[in-house]
Image: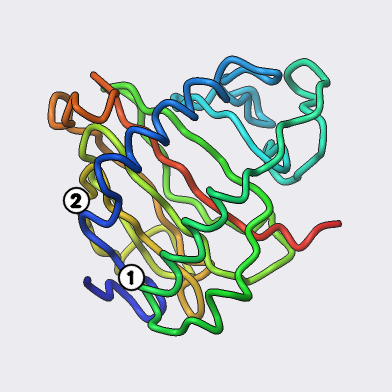
Amino acid sequence: MREVAPGAVHLPGWLTLDEQQRLVRACRAWATGPVPMRHTVLPRGGVMSVQTVCLGWHWQPYRYTRTADDVNGRPVPPLPEWLADLGRRAVAEAYGDRADADAYEPDAALINFYDDRATMGLHQDKDERSDAPVVSLSIGDACLFRFGNTETRGRPYTDVRLESGDAFVFGGPSRFAYHGVPKVHPGTGDPATGLTSGRLNITLRVTGLR
């Protein structure tokens, strides 16, 4: 376990192989509907290179909705309790505080799939009305994860290699830090997870919405 910045904790190898396999199977089901996985279109017309599907709340730039109005208008599936439990476990291990973890109630998950050319620019997760921690889970190919500061997309930042099974939790002073994925390392994942190529990233969030 490594604290990358105050409130930002890397948990290497945190997911077991069985847990990774379960997540891969679940993500395949979520990706096919009722709202299919898609490349998000940005407000100025750009298209994100990652593909995304959501649970609990549907995210599109700058807002959350219960229906996928930019895809097919259908309600998004609920966030299952077993996935929320994974988030609570990660918070407990990252911060060593079971009480804080028990109070952690994620109500949205963004599942991003990266092929070998996909990247994610430095950004803040700030569309939520809550400062509860974000829990990020990685499966498949390793990536270069860049974790920065809360003021600017520039330095200082720390580069972390996230491997399959890793968890990364950021909250407290680092909750609104800029972060992104400049590179995925193709062919580094373990096919035993059920994912033969690419990278899955599941992020759990508390929206603060009703």
**Amino acid carrying mark 2 in the image:** Arg
Q: Circle 1 is placed at which residue position?
A: 9
Quadrant occupied by the N terminus: bottom left
**Amino acid carrying mark 1 in the image:** Val
| 171 with respect to 90 (left or right) | right
Seen as rendered, the residue at the extreme left is: 188
Q: Position of residue 132 (x, y in %)?
A: 60, 70
Up-down: is 113 above or below 102? above
Res 50 → quadrant: top left
Mark 1 burial class by Cα count in 10 Å: few <14, some 14-19, many 20+ = many
- Asked if the residues shown at circle 2 and circle 1 are in contact, with their CB atoms under 8 angstroms apart, the answer is no
Up-down: is 193 above or below 57? above
| 167 with respect to 61 (left or right) | left
Res 47 → quadrant: top right
| Element marked by disc 2 | strand
What color scheme is it? rainbow
Q: Position of residue 139 (x, y in %)?
A: 31, 38
Residue name at image x 65 percent, y 43 percent: 79
Residue name at image x 47 percent, y 58 percent: 135
Seen as rendered, the residue at the extreme right is: 210
Residue name at image x 36 percent, y 59 percent: 168
Res 45 → quadrant: top right
Up-down: is 54 above or below 158? above
Mark 2 burial class by Cα count in 10 Å: few <14, some 14-19, many 20+ = some
Mark 2–mark 1 Cα distance, whole angstroms, equals 13 Å
Q: Position of residue 37 (x, y in %)?
A: 57, 20
Q: Circle 2 is placed at which residue position?
A: 161
**Dot 2 or dot 1, earlier in sequence:** 1
Q: Position of residue 175 (x, y in %)?
A: 51, 70
Residue name at image x 45 percent, y 59 percent: 178
Quadrant occupied by the C terminus: bottom right
